[in-house]
Amino acid sequence: MRPLAFVDLETTGATATADRITEIGIVEVDADGSVREWQQLVNPGTRIPPFIEQLTGISNEMVADAPPFAAVAAETMKRLEGRLFIAHNARFDYGFLKNEFKRLGITFRASVLCTVKLSRTLFPEHKRHNLDSLIERHELRADARHRALADAQLIFQFWQKIHADRSIEAIEAALHAQNAHPSLPPHLDASILEDLPEGPGVYLFYGENNLPLYIGKAKDIRQRVLSHFAGDHSSAKEMAIAQQVRRIDWIETAGEIGALLKESALVKQLQPTQNRLLRKNDESCTWTLVDEGEGWLRPQLVLASDLEFDIRTACYGLFKTTKEANQVLRTLAESHNLCDILLGVEKAKPGKPCFGHQLHRCKGACVGKEPLAKHTMRLMTALTGLKLVSWPFPGPALIREGDEAHLIEGWRYLGTARSDEELHALRDNPRPAFDRDAYKLLAKYVGKMVPLNWNESLPRL
């Protein structure tokens, strides 16, 4: 029998890249059947949230004098090395340990078995496969739920139970189904499967040269990359990528926002052949309103790169071309009975009616039949759905994500930092051009932004 390690962790939260381990429990089973148990509290270096304290029973006081993970890393590695890593929802426990080792500059890699997946395969007639369901279904003995060693013992009990109740053939078939790898393109080394990370980031597919074929972002790089090579390719593009790819690189990020920003920036920088939506960064334009007096606001088309998008300037729509912008304005004129002359889409001598008025579409603001202020109110109503989010800060802002901070100013992405030194270095970088894709992404996360004042002491990263 292969040596086994039944593993359970308690943590400060659910995100492996941001949260930390508070307790490790391992049940080691050797090839001869001998069993050893190990449990270790860990100081996470951060506060344990109250609801986690209540769930696990592990308080901040309990871990205050416990060693940090760095002090127990060698012992943990010794107990796991060369063993099949078995955990309930193994992706969670394995991901946390990989990240803890990674912070120390250590690469941790193991063969992994998930007992959630194993239970689903062996007992498909049941809907629930969490640990509490397994306790009830298989009459497992639970001494202290949500403590690391007690839960690792439950996983070991489940392993013993299925070996008593099911045939070796059935268990082997279930294990094979869980560990079956998807087919890879013929020119890719199969060892890449061991290296692909399971967290968020950006991946790059390369062909025979150093220019990328395709750049993508993912919440789970491994899962997303392997989905490209599924047997039933969903598109001609997927087929072309699979046939041409020779090498895969990736950049891990702290979260989804960082992955989205990195993907957009890399696509524009490297121009991969299979990325079309994000490749072009044409000069965008937008409508602003100019006060002409007497209640008349006139639309004016300006380049987005010339604007700060601050709270004083209302902007409406982002357009790739002046033709597109004018077409949208004409459509609004027709649907809201606006005057083509006052909108600037038709030239005429003062006091002359616009063409729309002659068609009884314009309500006559051009010839004094309608007050200019009333026309302006209708124009504002028409533009409401196009209004852009104003930049809400007098200067730059940060979006914190795990151990990263994204620096933004005027909707322009200035870069990502992991330390105060890196953050200060970003300040000196040339300011990038306004990017339409970056704006659309960042506007969704304005609620996560924190203003930054370079003249004040910066928050520690």
Image: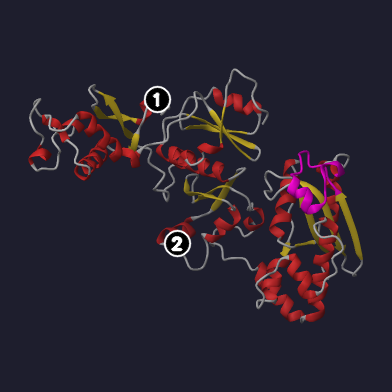
- Helix, strand or loop at label 1? It is loop
Q: Which quadrant would residue 160 be assigned to in this image?
A: bottom right
- Taking the magenta stretch, the answer to whether it contains residue 305 is no
Residue segment shown in magenta: 41-62
In space, the residues marked 1 and 2 are separated at their CA atoms by: 49 Å
Q: Which quadrant would residue 307 be assigned to in this image?
A: top left
User: Could you tell me which residue is drawn at 51 percent across and 59 percent down?
Assistant: 228
User: Could you tell me which residue is drawn at 83 percent across and 56 percent down?
Assistant: 147
- Please, what is the three-letter code of the amino acid marked with disc 1? Arg
At which x and y percent is residue 309?
Answer: 41, 29
Q: Is residue 230 left or right of residue 193?
A: left
- Helix, strand or loop at label 2? It is helix
- Disc count in the image? 2
Residue behind mark 2 = 239
- 197 or 358, which is in the foreground? 358
Q: Which mark is residue 99?
A: none
Q: Quadrant of the N terminus?
A: bottom right
Q: Is residue 357 left or right of residue 21?
A: left
At which x and y percent is residue 121?
Answer: 67, 74
- Please, what is the three-letter code of the amino acid marked with disc 2? Met
Q: Are marks 1 and 2 in contact (CB under 8 Å)?
A: no
Residue behind mark 1 = 312
- Taking the magenta stretch, the answer to whether it contains residue 49 is yes
User: Could you tell me which residue is drawn at 79 percent across and 75 percent down?
Assistant: 138
Q: Residues within 10 Å of mark 1 (few under 14, many from 20)?
A: few
Task: Say which label, 1 or 2, has the lower sequence index.
Answer: 2
| Numbered disc in front, either 1 or 2 | 1
